[in-house]
Image (spheres, rainbow, N blue to C red):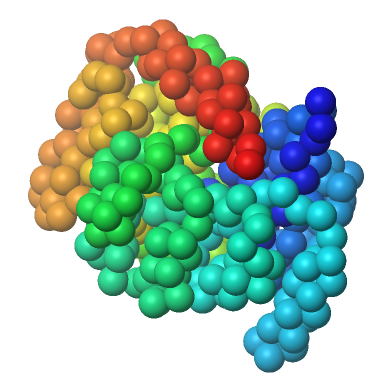
């Protein structure tokens, strides 16, 4: 079978994050007999280990790293000029930004162009789209959203079909214990440490005397939240991790996961991972998060505009469900395997990427 030569263009790559996790698994699972992948990163801010990963798994991997935007733009234009002369069947663009439109336009109309939108697609999200980005989603051959509500939001504003295919995620080991072993209930968050992920709210909750039965844990990195930031709070800051093995250990150490996000989430990779393990979670209702919930005792979804008192009340109810063992873990694992695991979505991606 002839391989589909696919160029991945992503505007920016950090060390960690939802797009970063998806792309790693995307390349690992799609780079097979039917696909020949190359990746071009408009602004690479990751580490050497991640760069080596892409270089080992993709046919070509190009990373633009200059801190200066004019130099990055020049490097990008030169690379696109060279790529115009190469045979590329499919362009898969990922992320947001003006440069996506220019890359697609310069590579020419002969390409099968698939764009993947990661966030919620609601009005708040739409307000952040520059005109060039709207043109991307109107002119490309296929627009992909990572959850059904997001696809409907985007389809309404674009007045075109928008497909729903979940992101790739890592399937984790099942959580061993269904009730806390002893003492306090351990609730944790892992991911990017940015304000929009509810880090400050977690810190405030940790100080609440009504929540003294909870131990809060955080893993991740972020310039605005260095380790010293957490010293004044009842937060167990555990640093950063970079392997699936470490993530499995984190899941086994927790009784529940919380995501108090203000970000226009699409379908958070962390919740998919947690879901695959059967670990209970509580999250704000953003993007496609509500689609992941199968049992309000196991997957508690709260309003994204809930006030502090409401969030605290839901948190206490969540802890009570965990302590009572009132959670059907296996049902959650089965839903993940049926709808979100690699075997469930790989063929969907293969079909949409094929010219």
Note whether residue 63 is visible: no
Q: Is residue 199 above or below residue 5?
A: below
Q: Is residue 3 above or below residue 143?
A: above
Q: Residue at x 40, y 61 (%)?
A: 138
**At which x and y percent is residue 146?**
43, 41
Q: How many marks?
A: 0
**At which x and y percent is residue 106?**
66, 73
Note whether residue 41 is visible: yes
Compare residues 292 and 213 and report the one nearer the observer: 292
Residue closest to the far front: 110
Quarter in which the N terminus is drawn: top right
Quarter in which the C terminus is drawn: top right
Q: Is residue 23 above or below residue 330?
A: below
> In the image, 52: left or right of 273?
right
**At which x and y percent is residue 334?**
44, 11
> In the image, 59: left or right of 20?
right
**At which x and y percent is residue 84?**
78, 68
- Quarter of the image for residue 35 reads top right
Q: Residue at x 84, y 60 (%)?
A: 86
- Quarter of the image for residue 242 reads top right
> In the image, 29: left or right of 148?
right
Compare residues 336 and 106 and report the one nearer the observer: 106
Compare residues 78 and 325 and report the one nearer the observer: 78
> In the image, 344: left or right of 240?
left
Q: Residue at x 80, y 35 (%)?
A: 3
Compare residues 301 and 24 and report the one nearer the observer: 24
């Amino acid at each position: 079978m002839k391989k589909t030569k696919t160029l991945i263009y992503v505007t920016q790559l950090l060390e960690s994050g939802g797009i970063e996790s998806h792309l790693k698994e995307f390349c690992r699972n799609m780079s097979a007999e039917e696909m020949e992948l190359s990746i071009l990163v408009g602004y690479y801010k990751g580490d050497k280990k991640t760069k080596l990963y892409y270089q080992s798994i993709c046919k070509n991997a190009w990373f633009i790293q200059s801190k200066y935007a004019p130099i990055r733009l020049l490097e990008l234009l030169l690379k696109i000029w060279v790529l115009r002369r190469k045979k590329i069947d499919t362009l898969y663009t990922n992320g947001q930004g003006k440069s996506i439109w220019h890359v697609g336009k310069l590579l020419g109309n002969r390409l099968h162009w698939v764009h993947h939108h990661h966030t919620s697609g609601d009005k708040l999200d739409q307000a952040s789209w520059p005109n060039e980005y709207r043109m991307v989603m109107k002119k490309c051959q296929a627009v992909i959203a990572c959850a059904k509500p997001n696809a409907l939001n985007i389809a309404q504003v674009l007045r075109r079909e928008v497909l729903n295919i979940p992101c790739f995620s890592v399937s984790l080991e099942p959580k061993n214990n269904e009730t806390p072993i002893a003492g306090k209930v351990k609730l944790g968050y892992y991911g990017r440490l940015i304000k929009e992920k509810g880090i400050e709210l977690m810190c405030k909750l940790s100080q609440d005397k009504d929540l003294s039965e909870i131990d809060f844990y955080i893993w991740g990195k972020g310039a605005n939240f260095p380790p010293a930031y957490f010293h004044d709070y009842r937060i167990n800051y555990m640093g950063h991790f970079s392997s699936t093995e470490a993530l499995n250990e984190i899941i086994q150490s927790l009784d529940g996961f919380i995501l108090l996000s203000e970000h226009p989430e699409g379908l958070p990779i962390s919740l998919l991972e947690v879901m695959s393990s059967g670990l209970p979670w509580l999250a704000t209702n953003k993007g496609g998060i509500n689609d992941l919930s199968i049992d309000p005792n196991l997957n508690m979804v709260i309003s994204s505009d809930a006030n502090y008192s409401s969030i605290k009340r839901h948190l206490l109810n969540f802890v009570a469900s965990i302590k009572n063992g009132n959670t059907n873990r296996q049902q959650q694992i089965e839903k993940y395997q049926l709808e979100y695991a690699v075997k469930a979505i790989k063929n969907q991606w293969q079909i949409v990427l094929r010219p």
